Amino acid sequence: MDLPPVLLSQDEISARVDELAAEIDRVYAEAGSLVLIGVLKGSFIFLSDLARRLTVPHRIEFIAVSSYGAKESEVADPVRLIMDVRHAIDDENVLLVEDIVDTGHTLAYLKRLFAAHDPRSVRTCTLLHKPDRTEEDVDLDFLGFTIPDVWVVGYGLDYAERYRTLPYIAELPPEMR
Ligand code: PRP
């Protein structure tokens, strides 16, 4: 099988995840609680690498969302929750963990949703951000890489469920779609 070309190598990702974990450790050093909430499916590899580098105590939750198609993007909230956290997050420090922020709708929706549960804090962490695609602004408290508007796969990200377990992030050229 032909492999798509590297945009971010394993070494670059690993070094940046080290830095992000160190930043998160600093911010939550005195926090007393931290819940990492991974947004399935794309975040599963990033979250597992990030969480294993943290030294602050934390627990892990996963959620899943579904996005409406382009034609329905005029609806008030183009995202809906299809799998919730197992344990209540009231009185916790919540860190939403994403693989990529594209239009921003998913993370903006999730931030509103979890803020409504009245946790101690809600912050966001994303490995990748495509600012050229932003439709809805959301604060990115911890950000790995800003990337151009190209189709990326690998390290959790897919194209039609392929390439998720590539160990690096690749730019998928049109002829491979
Ligand atoms: C991706 C990504 C984010 C969302 C970001 O998920 O993991 O959750 O899209 O897009 P947005 O900023 O435009 O809202 P995707 O729908 O590809 O599902 P997957 O993670 O299960 O592959």
Image (tube, rainbow, N blue to C red):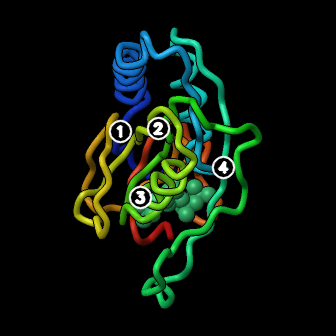
> Does the numbered disc 3 mark a residue whose Cβ is under 8 Å from ligand 1?
yes
Q: CA distance from mark 1 to mark 4?
A: 26 Å
- Check disc 1 and report its element: helix, strand or loop: strand
- Check disc 2 and report its element: helix, strand or loop: loop
Whether residues under marks 1 and 3 lie with C-beta atoms below 8 angstroms apart, the answer is no
In the image shown, does 103 or 174 lie closer to the viewer?
103
In x, y percent, where is residue 104? 37, 61
Quadrant housing residue 90:
top right
Residue carrying label 2: 168
> Does the numbered disc 1 mark a residue whose Cβ is under 8 Å from ligand 1?
no
Q: Type of residue at label 4? A: Ile
Camera-nearest label, 2 or 3: 3
Q: Is residue 148 left or right of residue 63?
A: left
Whether residues under marks 2 and 3 lie with C-beta atoms below 8 angstroms apart, the answer is no
Q: CA distance from mark 2 to mark 3?
A: 27 Å
Residue carrying label 3: 108
Q: Which mark is residue 63?
A: 4
In x, y percent, where is residue 59? 65, 24
Q: Earlier in the sequence, mark 1 or mark 3?
A: 1
Q: Which residue is at a point 53% across and 37% down the rendered structure image?
A: 119
